[in-house]
Image (cartoon, rainbow, N blue to C red):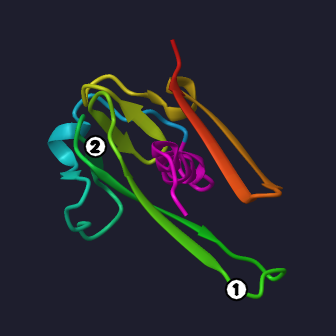
Amino acid sequence: MNWSTGSFLVWLLALLTAAGCVSFQSPDGDLISRAPIVEIGQPKPQGNEYILLVRAGKEVPVKLSVSGSFLSEEGLAETKVKLRQDLYLYKYWSSFDGNHWERSHRMFDALISAGLEPEGGKVDIKFNKVQ
C-alpha cells in the first residue's frame, strides 16, 4: 500500500486528541527551560514531561495500522512525511517557536475519511494549518 504524506496526520491527530487526563492549563513561559526538548527520532526521555520538536524538512516516519475483530488479517503501512515549518508539541499544546503555545485543535484542522471502493480500502487525511 502506498500512503500519501497525509498519513502523518493519523499519528499527529492521535497525539493531539489523547488529552483525556491532562490538565487544561496552558504551558507557562519557562516551559522550555524546565522540560527537555526531544527531536523526533531521538529516544524518549524518562517520564512524560518533555517537548517534542519536529523540524521543518526532516523526514518523519509514520505508521498506520488497520486492525479489529472483523478482520482475519491485520495490516500496517509505513511512510515518511515532512513539515513545512518547525512544530513543538507538549501534551495537547502546539507551538511554532517553542514560546507561544496554543491548543493544537486551534492551530490545525484535520479531516479524515476512510472507506472501501472496488479498488480496495482508502484512507484520505487532510491536515491544514488554521489561518
Q: Residue furthest top?
A: 131
Circle nearer the N terminus (1, 2): 2
- Given residues 44 and 109, the one toward you in this image is 109
Percent across and percent down for residue 62 are 42, 58
Label 1 and label 2: CA atoms lie apart by 33 Å
Amino acid under disc 1 = Glu
Q: Residue at x 44, y 48 (%)?
A: 91
Q: What quarter of the picture does the N terminus occupy?
A: bottom right
Task: Give the number of the disc on residue 54.
Answer: 2
* 76 is within the stretch colored magenta: no
Q: Which residue is drawn at 44% across and 33% down?
A: 26
Residue span colored magenta: 1-23
Task: Give the number of the disc on residue 73.
Answer: 1
Give the tally of numbered discs: 2
For label 1, the SS is loop
Percent across and percent down for residue 28 are 33, 32
